[in-house]
Image (cartoon, helix red, strand yellow):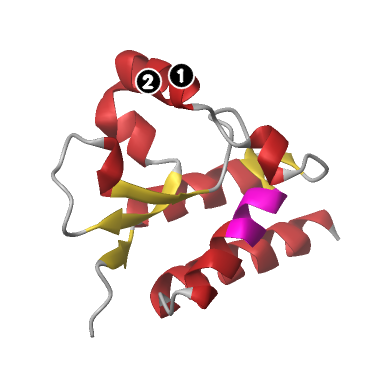
Amino acid sequence: MASKYRVNDDGVAKARQMIDSNQYDLETEWGDAAPSSEQSNEKIDRDGYDGYGEWHLALDTEASEETKDRYAFPFGDFHRVVRSGLIAAKQRAAQNEHDAVEKAADELLAHLDGVRS
């Protein structure tokens, strides 16, 4: 069965650009950093669905555009890339056999770790 998720190129580009600009958090656990529903709604109100969506590594091809359900595998807190968010995205993608999303998260983690060393 084909995955209903496809890699969100805008999200991957956003994460890479933020890593290159040293805008990342290496310490915070994803459970503490992941945006709340309220924070997500505020982001949509401020920047629209495009601004919200660029913080996600995947698009749900079966979900309607202009909905939160359209975007999956968040990686940051709307301010920084959160390393634990990339790890969580990679693990969840791997568990659910979303190979392209897993690969994108893995490449971003390698890029982040390469920038840091």
Give the SS element for disc 2.
helix
Q: Does the magenta stretch include residue 10?
A: no
Which quadrant of the figure contains the C terminus?
Answer: bottom right
Q: What's the mark number on residue 89? A: none
Mark 1 burial class by Cα count in 10 Å: few <14, some 14-19, many 20+: few
Give the SS element for disc 1.
helix
Q: Residue at x 57, y 40 (%)?
A: 76
Stretch of the chain drawn in magenta:
83-88
Determine which residue is flagged by label 1.
Answer: 38
Q: Is residue 22 visible?
A: no
Q: How many marks?
A: 2
Q: Are marks 1 and 2 in contact (CB under 8 Å)?
A: yes
Q: Can residue 29 be seen in this view?
A: yes
From the viewer's perspective, is residue 42 above or below residue 31? Answer: above
Determine which residue is flagged by label 2.
Answer: 41
The CA distance from mark 1 to mark 2 is 5 Å
From the viewer's perspective, is residue 50 above or below residue 46? Answer: below
Q: Residue at x 22, y 36 (%)?
A: 67
Name the spot of residue 68 as percent of width and height, x first.
29, 37
